[in-house]
Amino acid sequence: MTPTSSSQFTLPTWADAGRQTEFERWLGGLAVAHGLRPSSLRVASADASFRRYLRIDSNLSGVGSRVIMDAPPDKEDCKPFAKVAALTAQAGLQAPEILAWDDLHGFMLLSDLGQQTLMQHIQTTTSPLGDSFYPQDTPTSAVQALFGQAIDALIKWQLASKPGVLPAYDETLLRRELALFPDWYLTQHKGIVIDTKMRTALDSLFDAVVAHNLAAPQVYVHRDYMPRNLMMPVAEGASLGVLDFQDAVYGPITYDIASLMRDAFWTWDEPYVIDVTVRYWQQARKAGLMDFEDWHQDFGAFYRAVEWMALQRHLKVAGIFARLTLRDGKPKYLADTPRFIQYLRSTSARYRELTPLLRLLDKVENIQAVTGYAFGRV
C-alpha cells in the first residue's frame, strides 16, 4: 500500500488532552508489534454514538491498514462489541478481528474490512428518483447480488442463535424503544402536548405492536443490519463485512430483514423490498427458521409480521433521530425523518388497526388526506 501523506486525510482532534496522552502512549506500545505507522493516523468514521473510528497504515506485508476504535469508557462499553465480534466470527461472518484492546481507556485495534460500505457502493451505482426519501430505481444486477450476500450472512447469523447468550429483546426493551417516539419526536421535536386521548391511543398502539412482535420466533438480532453497516468485499470471492453489531440482542426473527430492506438512509421501491424479502424467506424456510404457525408455507403471513416489526423500528428511529439532534447536537440524522414518516404512513394505511396512527401522523405532519371522485370511485 502506498503511504498516505498527512495532507490527504483528516487528522483526529481531541477534546480531552489527558485522553490524547493515554491514546498516544497506548498506540506507541503497539506500533512495533503490529507494524503501525502513527504518522498515518486519520479519521475513518464516526457513528451516532460517542465512539469514533480511526484508520492507520501498517508496514506488515499484506495488511495495508488497521482500524482503531476510540470509545470513551464513561460513555461507551466495549465489552458488548467484543462479545458479539466473537459470536459473528463463530457464525462464519466477516467481522473485524480484535487485535489489541485497552479496556480501561476504551481503545481497540481492529482488522480493517475496507473503506467502502454497501451504502456508498449503492449511491455510486444507482440513480435516485426525486428527493432522498422517495423510492429509488431497481438496483443494478451487481447490487442485487450483494443483497444476496447480505441474506446469506443474515441466515448464518440466525442459525448460530442460542438463548441466554445475548440480552433479550423483551417487552421492557420494546416498550422503552417505542417511548422514544412520543418522548422525543412528538414532544421535543414537534412540540406536541400529549393529552389523555392521545396517550390512550398511543398506549393501545404500542400494546398491539409489542404483542405482534413478541409472538415471532427468537434469534440473534444484529439490530442495525443495513447497507451502511455492511462493508464491500475487499477481494474477489470475499464476503460482505459486518459492522456496528455491539447492540445485538436475542429477539424477533423479523427484525433484521426489516432493517435491511427499510433502510434508514435509502428507500427502495416496494416491489424490490418484497422481492428480497421473499428470497430471504425462501432461504430461511429451507434452513428451518420459518417453522412457526403457517410461515413455512405462507409468505404473506411472514411479510405481515415483518411490517409490524418494521413499524416498531421506524417509531423508535424517528425518536432516536430527534434525540440525536436535540440532545447530542447531530442534526444530520433528522434530515432523514421524512423517510420514516413515509414508511409509517405506508404501513399504517394497510392495516385497519393502525388507522389511528395514520391519522395522528397526518395531523402531526400537517398532511391532508387526498380524497376525490373519479369514475364513480373514491
Image: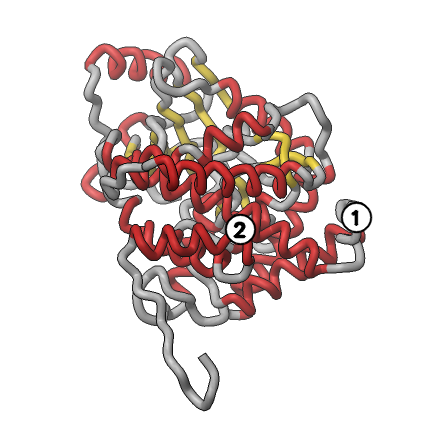
Q: Residues within 10 Å of mark 2 (few under 14, many from 20)?
A: many
Q: Secondary structure at mark 1?
A: loop
Q: Residue at x 37, y 43 (%)?
A: 318
Q: Amino acid at mark 2?
A: Leu
Which residue lies most toward the front here? 197
Give percent across and percent down for residue 283.
73, 54
Left or right, residue 326 beside residue 46: left
Labels 2 and 1 touching (C-beta < 8 A): no
Q: Secondary structure at mark 2?
A: helix
Q: Quadrant of residue 127?
A: bottom left
Q: Quadrant of residue 163?
A: top right
Give percent across and percent down for residue 184.
32, 35
Which residue is nearer to you in this view: 42 or 57?
42
Q: Where is mark 1, residue-wise?
A: 293
Nearer the observer: mark 2 or 1; the answer is 1
Q: Residue at x 38, y 41 (%)?
A: 198
Give percent across and percent down for residue 205.
50, 43
Which residue is nearer to you in this view: 301 or 279?
301
> Which quadrant: the N terminus?
top left
Which residue is nearer to you in this view: 318 or 333?
318
Q: Amino acid at mark 1?
A: Glu
Give percent across and percent down for residue 248.
56, 31
Which residue is nearer to you in this view: 372 or 65?
372
Left or right, residue 227 beside residue 236: left
> Which quadrant: the C terminus?
bottom left
Answer whether residue 9 is visible to the viewer in this image.
Answer: no
Q: How far apart are labels 2 and 1 at the CA level?
A: 24 Å
Specify the label residue 260 is tagged with. Answer: 2
Vertical relation: 41 (above or below) 315? above
Q: Residue at x 52, y 48 (%)?
A: 310
